[in-house]
Structures are given as structure tokens and as C-alpha cells.
Image (cartoon, rainbow, N blue to C red):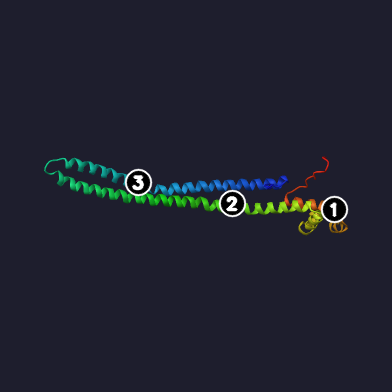
Amino acid sequence: MVRWYADLPAVRARQVTADAVWLVLVTASVLLGRAVNGAVSALAAPARGFTGGARDLERQLDGAGENAADLPLVGDELAGPLQRAADGAASLAAAGQQQVDAVTQLATVLGLASAAVPVVLVTLLRLVPRRRWQRRADETRRLLRTPGGEELLALRALHTRSPAELLGVHPEPVLAWRRGDPAAVRALADLQLRAVGLRRRPAPGDAAP
């Protein structure tokens, strides 16, 4: 079973707070990406207006050319220039649409980058220590269940915990561990468990308190 949070309330509270900070940062990154996308997309507004105007002009010139073609005698002479002007307007509309597409693509790329880069960074900064803690907690639990594991946890506490913590467990913690004092060994092992944020769980055969 994957262990997500520590047993001790103080350690678990720090983990939950760190998760909440991560969630806030991810949300802020997504909002930043959307804001960047909107700001860059707004730069395409003039090109969109130009494209729309060119298309309207193309339609009007096409209509005028078709009407002129119906006129007797001079219809062909009038329709030709109008059709060429309509083709020119279509070319301008196509150029404007290319500009709109380029800005829209840039807005998408910048928006995604503005959101994805911070999200990846804060997620890595959160997942790496969380995964390290999970491995440490699982290893500590497995060690406690192995023969001699409690003594090894007690020895680890002697090497890693502060003198004040050790003296709070026993006035002579090293000598007590060397003698194999069961109460001192258990207390030292529990000290190491608490350092990881865990507490001793009763064995399946233990009577309920």
C-alpha cells in the first residue's frame, strides 16, 4: 500500500500544507498560461479586422463584377477590372488570415509554455522529496518487522538524533543499547520512527489496549 502521509499529526500537517502550496502554484501557473495566451491572441485583433474587411470587399467586388457582366456592350470591359480587384482583395484576405494564424499559433505555444514549465518544476520539487519520504517510511516499516530490525533502528537513532533527544529517552542511551536493554532499545527505535513521521503500530497478535 502506498503511504501518502505520515502518521504523526505535525509531520502530516506539513505534508498537507506543502501539497496545498503545490496545488495553488499549479493553479496559478495555469491561470498565467491562459493570461499569456489571451494577451498574445489580442495582438491578432487588427489582422482579424483587416481580414474581415478584405473579405467583405472581395464579396462586394464579386457581386459588382457579376452585375456588370450582365450589362450590354460594356459588360465584359467592366467585369474584368472588378474581378481582378476582387482577386486582389482575396489575396489580401489570405495574407491577413496567415497573420492571424501565426499569432494564434504563437499564443498557443507561449500559453502552454508559461503554464507547463512552472507546473513541471513545482511538481518535481514536490514529488522528489515526497517520493524520498515514501521510500524512507516503507524501508523503516519493513526494517521494524525484520528480526533485529528494532535494534538497527535504535542504532540509527544513536547516529542521527540529537543528544537532547537521546538523553530524553535514556540517561545512558549508548550503554543501554549495548546491554540490549529492551525498554531502551524500543524507546530508541520509536525515536527513529518519529523522526520519519511514523508511529509504532500494534502487531496483529497484540491485544487491544
Q: Is residue 69 left or right of residue 128?
A: left
Q: Is residue 191 visible?
A: no
Q: Nearer the viewer, residue 109 or 158?
A: 109
Query: Dividing the picture into quarters, in which one does residue 202 lie?
Result: top right
| The C terminus: image quadrant | top right
Q: Given contact means CB atoms under 8 Å apart, are the residues at marks 3 and 2 in contact?
A: no
Q: Is residue 10 left or right of residue 53?
A: right
Question: Disc 1 on helix, strand or loop?
Answer: helix
Q: Earlier in the sequence, mark 3 or mark 2?
A: 3
| Residue at the spot of label 1 | 184
For the residues marked 1 and 2, what is the alpha-carbon distance in whole angstroms?
A: 41 Å
Q: Residue furthest left?
A: 73
Residue in view at x 57 percent, y 46 percent: 24
Residue in view at x 68 percent, y 45 percent: 13
Q: Is residue 23 above or below residue 132?
A: above
Query: Dividing the picture into quarters, in which one does residue 66 lie?
Result: top left
| Residue at the spot of label 3 | 48
